[in-house]
Amino acid sequence: MYNFGSNYYGAGVGGPSMMYGFGTGMIFLMLWSLLWKGLALWHAGRRGQEWWFVALLLINTAGILEIIYLFAILKLRFSKLFSK
């Protein structure tokens, strides 16, 4: 009987290496997003910007909105991101 979901070597569509790459990519994306979201929320909270804090907390853009907020809205330099 022929298995339609596998290739010649018995692996399913994409194979094990595709799943490994997908998992690694998802972990990287989660850590990337968490870093930028944490920095943006911290700066918005310290400045008392409630609307930005709520927007940054609820909208998930993989770090894009957070980067725009930090560098375009606040006009921070990279060296000032981690300073108090």
Image (spheres, helix red, strand yellow):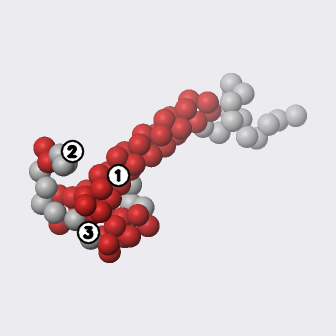
Compared to residue 3, the image places residue 78 above or below, namely below
Q: What residue type is labelled 1?
A: Gly
Q: Which amino acid does label 3 sit on?
A: Gly
Distance from disc 2 to disc 1, alpha carbons, whole Å, reads: 11 Å
Direction from residue 50 to residue 73 in the image, left or right: left
Classed neighbour count for the residue bearing mark 1: other residues with Cα under 10 Å, few (<14), some (14–19), many (≥20): some
Residue indicated by mark 1: 38
* N-term mark: 3 or 1: 1
How far across and down, in percent of the image, does residue 37 sit? 35, 54
| Proximity of marks 3 and 1: CB atoms separated by less than 8 Å | no
> Most extreme residue toward the bottom, as rendered?
51
Total number of numbered labels? 3
Direction from residue 6 to residue 22 in the image, left or right: left
User: Which circle marks residue 82 in the picture?
Assistant: 2
Quadrant location of the N terminus?
Answer: top right
Q: Which of 56 and 16 is in front in this view?
A: 56
> Most extreme residue toward the top, as rendered?
9
Provide the secondary structure element on which disc 3 rests: loop
How far across and down, in percent of the image, does residue 78 sit? 15, 46
Compared to residue 11, the image places residue 13 above or below, namely below
Provide the secondary structure element on which disc 2 rests: loop
Query: Which of labels 3 and 1 is toward the front?
Result: 3
Residue drawn at the location 32% of the way across and 72% of the way down: 50
Classed neighbour count for the residue bearing mark 2: other residues with Cα under 10 Å, few (<14), some (14–19), many (≥20): few
Distance from disc 3 to disc 2, alpha carbons, whole Å, reads: 18 Å
Residue drawn at the location 21% of the way across and 58% of the way down: 70
Residue indicated by mark 3: 48
Provide the secondary structure element on which disc 1 rests: helix
